């Protein structure tokens, strides 16, 4: 509902007024925050307050082509379609230059050919400065007369294709439009009159000289001639003074433009220098942090390696001591059994013991095989200790 055209609005050039803006730009305007928050519910009366708050003009900017507030207000005017008198008051507003540009842009989109030339050509005499937002997101300096010339001569402005209008000389030929009258036309007429008077004075002087050659000069005629020469001299001096003043004004305006461009160029250069300095500072800080982290990781790895070596050495020494004690006990137990067997057994029992010994030998081999299968007698003490734990948990041994 918020994006629909006013039902009372008339079609312009045979279509919906909002269709004068391309569909992609129109959808971006509908999604813009300024359109949703500031342009919702605006009328022709409240639109003036928002137009007075404008501080720059432009179409879209940035990587995602974000529309400017100027373009959002143009879209709102196309939606509500204010009356022609209100638009003309926008154009005639001398206090707020962006309000004037807003009205001129809307009239260029919706007005007839005659109205466009009639109301926009007088703005050629407005030389005030304007801020224009470029597609890169930067601001540039322009003037009101330059924007009006772009609207009257170009086919594209502020990312919008302008409707085609007839050439001025065609409208003059059809009688729909009067010939354009320049502001400097009065000065040109005065200069032409001055040239004609000089030529007439030259002819009169030649005639007087011929008459004086044939007869004596009269004092009254001499006074009139001197008075006329003084008047022409004063008039020429005033014209030269006015011309010099206009020339100095135009020269000063051009000097101001060059100074503004130089100031913008210096500001961009300083901004780039600050950005490079910040980038170098962040890179050095990241390199220091990375080096510090790597040193901390190396120290931690060294400590872990030392701890593992120390634990491995302890386990090895413990396993060696246990194996030595077990071998000593087995050795002592075997010698004790041998002595006891020699001293206490009879021949029969000895024979029976030999038979029992032969019978017990395969049992011992089986036990040794079982022990080998458990992996507890692995030569590496760490693997042997791990196999004992796995055997107690009922897991397969490590090989």
Image (spheres, rainbow, N blue to C red):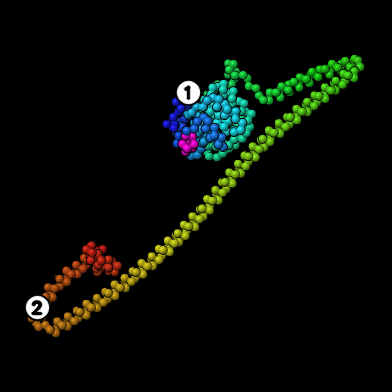
Q: Please state which of the two labelled residues, at mark 2 or mark 1, is closer to the viewer.
A: 1
The disc label shown at residue 360, or none: none
What residue is pinned by disc 2?
352
Q: Residues within 10 Å of mark 1 (few under 14, many from 20)?
A: few
What element does badge 1 sit on? loop
Query: In the rendered view of the protein, which quadrant contains the C terminus?
Result: bottom left
Q: Residues within 10 Å of mark 2 (few under 14, many from 20)?
A: few
- When asked about the image quadrant of residue 241, the answer is top right
At a point 46% along the width and 36% down the height, the residue shown is 36
At a point 73% along the width and 23% down the height, the residue shown is 191
Query: Which residue in the rendered view is the most extreme toward the right?
Result: 216
Front-most of 38 and 387?
A: 38
Q: Is residue 150 visible?
A: no
Q: Cα distance, mark 2 to mark 1?
A: 129 Å
User: Contact (CB < 8 A) between labels 2 and 1?
Assistant: no
At a point 78% along the width and 21% down the height, the residue shown is 198
Report x, y in % for residue 186: 70, 23
Q: Mark 1 or mark 2, which is nearer the start of the sequence? A: 1
What element does badge 2 sit on? helix
342 in magenta: no
Segment tinted magenta in the rendering: 32-40
Report x, y in % for residue 107: 54, 26
What residue is pinned by disc 1?
10
Query: In the rendered view of the protein, which quadrant contains the N terminus?
Result: top left
In the displayed structure, would residue 8 be above or below residue 29?
Answer: above
- Residue 301 left/right relative to 257: left
- Residue 85 left/right relative to 292: right
At a point 11% along the width and 77% down the height, the residue shown is 354
Front-most of 244 and 177?
A: 177
């Amino acid at each position: 509902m918020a994006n629909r055209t006013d039902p009372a609005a008339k079609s312009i050039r045979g279509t919906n007024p909002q269709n004068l803006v391309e569909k992609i730009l129109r959808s971006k305007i509908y999604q813009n925050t300024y359109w949703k928050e500031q342009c919702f519910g605006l009328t022709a009366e409240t639109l003036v307050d928002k137009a007075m708050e404008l501080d720059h003009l432009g179409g879209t900017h940035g990587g995602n082509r974000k529309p400017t507030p100027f373009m959002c207000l143009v879209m709102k005017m196309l939606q509500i379609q204010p009356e022609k008198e209100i638009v003309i008051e926008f154009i005639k507003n001398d206090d707020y230059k962006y309000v004037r540009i807003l009205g001129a842009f809307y009239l260029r989109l919706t007005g007839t050919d005659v109205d466009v030339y009639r109301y926009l050509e007088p703005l050629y005499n407005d030389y005030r400065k304007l801020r224009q937002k470029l597609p890169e997101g930067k601001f540039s300096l322009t003037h009101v007369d330059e924007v009006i010339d772009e609207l009257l001569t170009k086919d594209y402005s502020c990312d919008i294709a302008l409707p085609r209008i007839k050439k001025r000389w065609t409208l003059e030929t059809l009688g729909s439009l009067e010939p354009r009258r320049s502001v400097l036309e009065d000065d040109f007429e005065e200069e032409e009159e001055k040239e004609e008077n000089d030529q007439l004075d030259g002819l009169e002087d030649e005639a007087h000289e011929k008459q004086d050659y044939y007869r004596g000069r009269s004092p009254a005629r001499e006074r009139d001639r001197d008075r006329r020469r003084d008047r022409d001299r004063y008039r020429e001096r005033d014209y030269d003074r006015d011309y010099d003043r206009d020339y100095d004004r135009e020269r000063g305006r051009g000097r101001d433009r060059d100074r503004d461009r130089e100031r913008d160029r210096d500001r961009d250069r300083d901004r780039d220098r600050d950005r490079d300095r910040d980038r170098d500072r962040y890179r050095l800080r990241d390199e220091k942090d990375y080096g510090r982290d790597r040193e901390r990781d190396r120290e931690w790895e060294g400590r872990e390696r030392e701890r593992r070596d120390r634990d491995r050495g302890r386990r090895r020494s413990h396993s060696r001591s246990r194996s030595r004690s077990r071998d000593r006990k087995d050795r002592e137990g075997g010698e004790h059994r041998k002595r006891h067997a020699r001293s206490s057994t009879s021949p029969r029992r000895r024979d029976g013991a030999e038979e029992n010994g032969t019978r017990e030998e395969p049992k011992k081999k089986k036990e040794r095989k079982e022990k080998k299968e458990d992996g507890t007698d692995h030569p590496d003490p760490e693997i042997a200790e791990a196999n004992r734990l796995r055997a107690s948990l009922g897991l397969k041994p490590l090989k």
